[in-house]
Image (cartoon, rainbow, N blue to C red):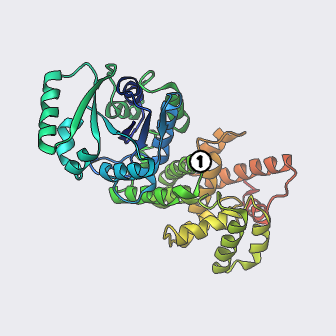
Amino acid sequence: MIGLFGGTFDPFHRAHRALPESAMQNLGLDQVIVMPVGRAPHKDRRTSFATYRFEMAQLGSADLGGVCVCDDEIRSPGVDYTFNTVMHLKKKLCPKKLFILAGSDVLVSIDSWYRVADLLKEVTLAIAVRGDGDTALLRSKASQTQQRYGGKVVFFEMPRMEVSATGLRASLLAGEKTEGMCPEAVQAFIGQYRLYDFALDFDMLSDDEWQDLLDLEEIIWPYLSQKRRLHSVSVAQYAARLARLNGLDVWAATAGGLLHDCAKGLPADTQRKLASLYLAECSCAESASRFCDDINLVHGPASAYVAKKEANVIQGELLNAIACHSTAKPNMTALEQIIFLADKIAYDRTFDRLVDIRAAAETGRLAVAMKRCLEEVFLALRRDEITPHPLSIAAYEEYAHL
C-alpha cells in the first residue's frame, strides 16, 4: 500500500515531516511518496523555484524509512492535478491500495479539486488529525464528502505542531529566528542558499514574468542533475539581485542564471556539436575549435544553443551572456558581466576574496568586480596548471588598470 503526500513544501517544515512518518506508522503503508507540486492549481501566490522545494523535501525526509521524494509533477508541463498524478502512479506502480495523505483543511477545499469524484473512486483519502481540531466536525465533513462522492475517508493521528508554511515564510522574510520549525538539514539549507532573502529583487517582476521563469526551470529540469539545478537557481537569484542593484532587466538576468549551464549535463560530443552550431550562427566559427577542444568551456555556447532552441530565448545579449559565462570576453555588456559574476560569486560558492567581489558588484562597480573575479579564476587555473582561455585574458586586459 502506498501513500501520496503532495504539496508546495515552501518551505518543508516539521509538520510536513511528521505527516508521512505518522501515516507510515498508523496506516500500515509500505511506502509514502512525497510529491512537490510543479504548478499548483489553487495557489494564489508565487511559489519558490521547484529546485529548492524539491531539495528541501529530500533533506527533510531523508532518514524516514519508506519515504521517497518524487519529481513527477515538476517534470510534467502545465498545471498539476492530483487526479492525473494518481492515474500516472497507478499505471507505473500498480499499488494494491493508494492513499492521498492530507491535513484536515483538505475537507474544506476538496469540492474545488479537479475531477474530485473520479479521484475518490481511485484512492482512499487519509486525513491527519493533529489533536487541535474539532474531531466531531471533521468526521461530519468526512461523512458529507463520502456521501457526495462515494469515496472513502479515513483518519490517522499525528503530533500537534504549531507551524505553517505561511507563517514560516513570513518569519523568514522578516528576518526572524525560525530555529526548530524545520528539520535541521532544511534549516541549514535555507541559511546557506538564502532562499527567502530575495523578495526585493523578485518584486521587480510581474506575476507573468515570474511564471515565465518557473516555466524555464521546468524546461531545463531534465537536462540537469539536482546538484547542477541548485547551482543554476542560486546563480539566477544572485543575478536578479545584481540586476536590480545595477538598474538592469531583472527577468533577463534571472533567466540567464537559470539557463547558463543547461547543456552541461549533456554528453561531451553533444556539447561540442551544439557549441559549434551556436558559434557558427553568431559568426564566431573561428572560436569554435578552441571552445570545442575544452570540455570545461564548451558548455557555455552549447547552453546558449539549448536556450535558443528549447527555451525560445531570442535576446541576443542574453544568449551571448550565457555563451561567455565561463570565459568572459572583451567589451562585455553589463548583463554579460552580471551573468559571469553571478556564476562565480552566488551563495553556493566559496573562494578567496568572495566578500570583496560581492561588495563591488552590489555597489555598481562591476568592472572592479570583474577584475578581481578574473584574478581569482586565473589563480585557480594556475593551481591546476591550466592556461586561461584567450578570451579571458583579453577581457582581463580591459580591467587590469583598475
Quadrant containing the N terminus in the rendered view = top left
Q: Is residue 127 left or right of residue 57?
A: left
The residue lying toward the viewer, choosing from 237 and 93, is: 93
Residue 231 x %, y %: 59, 47
Residue 131 x %, y %: 26, 18
Three-letter amino acid code at disc 1? His
Residue to which mark 1 is pinned: 231
The residue lying toward the viewer, choosing from 17 and 156, is: 156
Q: Secondary structure at mark 1?
A: helix
Residue 300 in the image: above or below residue 231: below
Residue 374 in the image: above or below residue 272: above
Res 270 → quadrant: bottom right
Residue projecting furthest to the right: 385
Q: Quick check: can you spot residue 8?
A: yes
Give the residue drawn at x 44%, y 51%.
92
Give the residue drawn at x 72%, y 63%.
268
Residue 162 in the image: above or below residue 216: above
